[in-house]
Amino acid sequence: MNKNLKGFMLLMVLAMFALVAAACGNEGEAGSGSGSGVDVGIVLPTKDEPRWVQDEQRFKDALADSDYSTEILFSQGSSAKEKENVEALLNKGIKVLIITPHDGAAAAAAVEAAKADDVTVIAYDRLITDTDAVDYYVTFDSLAVGAAQAQYLVDNAEGTDVPLYLYAGASSDNNAFLFFQGAWEVLQPKIADGTFKIANSSEAEALSDTKELDRDQLSKIIGQVTTNWDPNESKNKAQTHLTSVGEDLKGDVAILAPNDGTARSIADVFASDSAVTNYTITGQDAEKASIQYIIDEKQSMTVFKDVRTLVEDAMGMAVDVLDGNDPETTGSYDNGAGEVKAKQTDVIVVDEENVKAELIDSGYYEASEFTGIE
Ligand code: BGC
């Protein structure tokens, strides 16, 4: 084969790959509606965590018979990709953007671009900070999530000096602050009265007399015990912690894990240490894998955030905007640049006792998706 022909064929093969890749890239599309434009753009942070795949599925279910067209794109843990996604949706003429930022501060630039195009911006689950380009915020009660996790540890602590291992979410996520703050307000009095003994954070120990932490104080603790929402980082941190503590910080322990993905990794590490005789560990999101862990008694609890409600609220707001109505809100959140009107949803604590009633009997999951549930 001559060189030119070879080059041409290579180009053809590359072009075919590009076509296939473009077709696969559209798999996030959902909804109906007519015309070539898109009415509502939805940008979610990553497909690598089941939590956000759950949201995608619930959006698709909710949109099945919507009159408006929608498209869902994932940012794969990158603020640059997120900005590209927003721009791609703006080019398709969206009128409403529903977005969960990967990084709450970095996303300001993306939503400012949307605002400049007269698009209504709805922050979904995670707040976008330090910009006035956010119109609405739909969220769960994140302080209540942290408080519920902490209360579970308090209710299950026996005796005094129970070793307490603290873990937090990513500092780039405003929710990580709310979860930790909510938890700390419940845990702090129980640290002060000797029920718990902090095992893995000198920063938390230094603040153990302070119930209400400001943002800087929270930052110090979170900076030390962050998981970055990453199961691998959680596992490495937990291993380091268990390697560096003495026997007095093992035995029957309490672990504040911020969500299900990190909880499963941390639980596996604690379960494999023979000096840990028992552990109580928290979580949130009611991910399927964690529901199985709860049934198998490997994770103690999760906070169930019914994504169907959040999707309904976000889409309800979007439709109100498209129909020219004012969306209903229930309160507001300060994002650093001002108050953002918000709609907030309650959460439910789930453990072995009520897992069937809350998640199976309610129709959220099918019993057949798990083993060991009657
Ligand atoms: C969400 C959690 C999630 C975490 C990691 C938070 O902003 O509220 O549900 O587990 O991000 O993705």
Image (tube, rainbow, N blue to C red):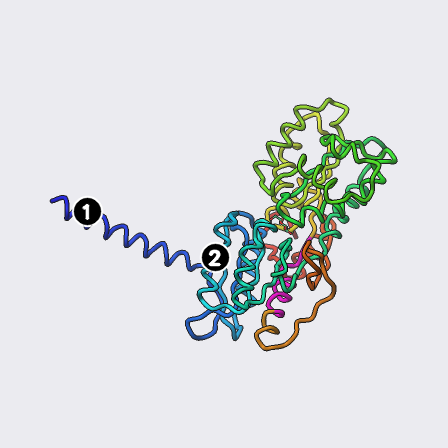
Which quadrant of the rendered structure holds the N terminus? top left
Residue at 68% x, 26% y is 274
Residue 85 as seen in the image, left or right of residue 181: left
Residue at 65% x, 61% y is 137
Place of residue 23 in the rendered image (x, y in percent of width and height, measured from the top left):
37, 59
- 105 and 92: which is toward the camera: 105
The residue segment tinted magenta is: 304-317
Mark toward the start of the polypeptide (2 vs 1): 1
Residue 207 as seen in the image, left or right of residue 263: right
In the depicted structure, whether residue 294 falls above or below residue 368: above
Callout 2, which amino acid? Asn
307 drawn magenta:
yes
Marks 2/1: CA–CA distance: 33 Å
Q: Is residue 1 visible?
A: no
* Numbered badge on residue 85: 2
Badge 1 element: helix
